[in-house]
Image (tube, rainbow, N blue to C red):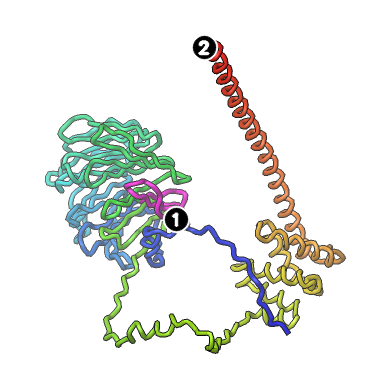
Amino acid sequence: MAAYKPVVVQVVPKLGERITQDTVYWRGYKTPVQIKEFGAVNKIDFSPVAPYNYAVTASSRIHIYGRYSQEPIKTFSRFKDAAYCATYRDDGNLIVAGSEEGSIRLFDVSGRAPLRQFDGHTKPVHVVGFLSDKYRVFSAGDDYASSLWDIPSSTEIISYNEHTDYVRCGCASKVNADVFITGSYDHTVKLFDTRVKNSVMTIEHGQPVESVLLFPSGGLLVSAGGRYVKVWDVLKGGQLLVSLKNHHKTVTCLCLNSSGQRLLSGSLDRHVKIYSTTSYKVVHSFNYATSVLSLALSPEDETIVVGMTNGVLNVKHRKPEVRKEKTAKKRQPAYRTYVKGRTYMPKQEDFCVSKPVKHVLRKYDKLLKSFQSSKALDAVLEPPIRLHTPEVTVAVMQELHRRGTLRSALAGRDEKQIDLLLTFVARRVIDPRFTSILVTVADIITDIYQPVVGQSAVVDRQFLKLQKAIGKEIDYQEELLEVLGMMDTLFATFTRKRVTCLEESKSNGLGETTETSMNN
């Protein structure tokens, strides 16, 4: 009696995601921690000094969180209405924030009451920050004005009124203590030098500007607005270097990693995209539950914090690198021990004894071996196989069809089992790998259970789904055939033109040769 041969499962390569070093790196963050705030999170800013606490601005409060704390370690709540854009100074000792009532408040991180209050704006102030000299603060708001303030004297140094719409973003240069940048809903980005009374550069973004970012070198500027992220060369007078359109909705925030080699952008489409700053291609992407409003990366890239419109703060920490403890290595046998005898060639008088190979059969193979067709089919309709390896289910169905026992295996099933079979067939029949056998299965099921149609609402619903799936696939095939016919016509036309051109060139060449010979 011949030995049983296991079912051969057709292996088809899958087009999976390309695994790169960036994929491995950005996947190295642990499961996120969710923290609920009182309102939409409009700004997140990390302290530049250890232990790298971060300030979260939401509703009328500013919360200071430790890197690993899920509760705020400090709260600033001296605001009558909403607070905006809480930002750390470079030394991590002071925080400045704007407000809905138009005032700007300066806080000491070790205190609670504001150290300074700057009044001058007539509408909400959405943008505040420190210049790199640490003694001046810039601000901008819904009154279209951009102002500069002196911290020691609490006075306004200069005010610019060049924007024609709300100013909602800004940043300061880390290289030049006199330069800061603002972005407005009037579609422009303006670069100001505090030594000059007017802006020194205006860049047209083309969409309401939601976020601006200056590279640490001060030579490149990134602006975000609408679906676009644009990179500009400041040293060349604001020349556009690249325009990125990888988001489906408005881009709301930008961030750089510590090395400046990766640019992060968050959007209302619930995605955070990570770009390489050399090729400006997307190297990784994060998905979130709701729209992203703010984004920050810790100075050592150990923590990613994302603020969303529903007031949820999403915090991801990098997994710590596991260091293997060095243990005393046991002495291993020499290499020659493993290869001994492998190169020996048997002689003619030698008697070779082969070691029997034991094949472990799977459950469905054991059932097929004992001719239990119905139970074998049940085994491959279990969720782990049916959902994750449908090719195994289809291979067993094909084997049953080859044996001629597929009809008996499908017959005699109750409502729940019929529902399961029809769900699988309706879902997988459009897959080109499985279409041939599953069409046969669908025909047999329809033939067997046609008399019970109308007796079960569940079974009737699955039959309708199957009919809809097959009908839709037929429509697709007809459309593809029409496109194929059009392409054949175009290719035939191109071929005919090429042949005609070749014939003309040949005839012209022959005529010239004949004329030359006659002249001679």
In terms of sequence position, does the residue under pointer 2 or pointer 1 come before the other?
Answer: 1
Quarter of the figure that contains the N terminus:
bottom right
Name the foreground residue: 513 vs 252: 513
Name the foreground residue: 46 vs 175: 175
Query: Which residue in the structure is indicated by mark 1?
Result: 310
In the rendered image, residue 269 lying in the magenta stretch gets the answer: yes
Badge 2: few (under 14), some or many (20 or more) residues near its Cα, within 10 Å? few
Residue 54 in percent (x, y) is at 28, 59
Q: State the residue at coordinates (53%, 10%).
A: 519
Query: Would you identify the image quadrant in which residue 53 lies?
Result: bottom left
Query: Which residue in the structure is indicated by mark 2?
Result: 520
Q: State the residue at coordinates (62%, 32%).
A: 495
Q: Secondary structure at mark 1?
A: loop
What are the residue bounds of the magenta stretch?
264-292
| 70 versus 371 height, above or below | above
Residue 422 in percent (x, y) is at 73, 64
